[in-house]
């Protein structure tokens, strides 16, 4: 909390945090970071701790992984999620392909709509209704058969 700059790995940071280093942490940013890690795993991770060699990774993924400049990372990540044309699903790591239709594609789709909604608002404040980066909305993708993920975890609201 005393740091005057943002800390973390830019490749996995929420887009809002990349564009505005003065923002305070919010749990929605942690969920977005998890989504970026999930996408990175989908294209670069083989089971057993092995990674797809960097030169074999899709170019659009390499662009947001290799840069250390926040603006470049933000642009590449936005392009990956917001462009329907550039999604390299055919290049997913083989062990992760089983998650394509159940997790990866739905996460990307929800990220796209949420990021577009946030761009329309162009301001911080309460999360827009239906924002994907809330626990309940995120769990609707990861565990669609669970009606109320908060109750399923035993939390008492």
Image (cartoon, rainbow, N blue to C red):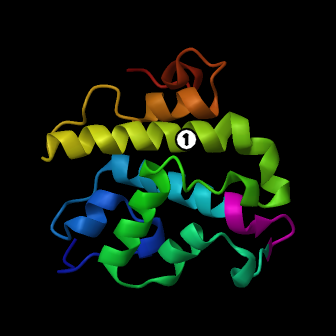
Q: Considering the numbered disc 1 on the image, is that residue within a helix, a strand or a loop?
A: helix
- Which segment did they paint magenta? 42-50
- Residue 117, image x, y percentages: 27, 37
Residue 29: x and y in percent read 36, 53
Residue 56 place in picture, x, y as percent: 75, 77
Q: Is residue 52 positioned above or below 109 on the image?
A: below
Residue 153 horizontal side relative to residue 111, left or right = right
Q: Residue at x 49, y 58 (%)?
A: 80
Corner quadrant of residue 45? bottom right
x 57%, y 14%: residue? 147
**In this view, 154 is above or below 44:** above
The image position of residue 151, as x and y in percent, is: 52, 19
Magenta stretch encompasses residue 45 = yes
Name the quarter where the C terminus is drawn. top left
Residue 75 visible here? yes
Splitting the image into 4 quarters, where does residue 129 fall?
top left
Q: Nearer the viewer, residue 66 or 9?
A: 66
From the image, tell me which residue sits under label 1: 107
Q: Is residue 55 above or below residue 8?
A: below
Residue visible at 52% across and 58% down in the picture: 36
Q: Nearer the viewer, residue 53 or 138?
A: 53
Question: Which quadrant would residue 59 be assigned to in this image?
Answer: bottom right
Mark 1, other Cα within 10 Å: few <14 / some 14–19 / many ≥20: many
Q: Extreme front residue here?
A: 85
Q: Nearer the viewer, residue 5 or 13?
A: 13
Query: Viewed as shown, does residue 22 lie left or right of 149?
Result: left
Task: Locate the N terminus by quadrant.
Answer: bottom left
Q: Is residue 7 visible?
A: no
């Amino acid at each position: 909390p005393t740091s005057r700059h943002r800390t973390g790995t830019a490749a996995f940071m929420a887009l809002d945090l990349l564009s505005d280093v003065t923002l305070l942490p919010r749990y929605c940013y942690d969920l977005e970071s998890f989504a970026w890690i999930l996408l990175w795993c989908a294209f670069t991770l083989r089971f057993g701790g092995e990674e797809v060699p960097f030169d074999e990774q899709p170019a659009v993924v390499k662009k947001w992984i290799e840069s250390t400049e926040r603006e470049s990372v933000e642009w590449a990540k936005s392009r990956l999620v917001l462009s329907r044309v550039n999604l390299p699903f055919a290049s997913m790591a083989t062990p992760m392909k089983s998650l394509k239709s159940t997790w990866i594609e739905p996460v990307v789709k929800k990220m796209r709509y949420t990021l577009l909604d946030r761009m329309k608002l162009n301001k911080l404040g309460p999360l827009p209704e239906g924002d994907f980066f809330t626990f309940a909305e995120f769990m609707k993708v990861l565990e669609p058969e669970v009606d109320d993920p908060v109750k399923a975890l035993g939390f008492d609201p």
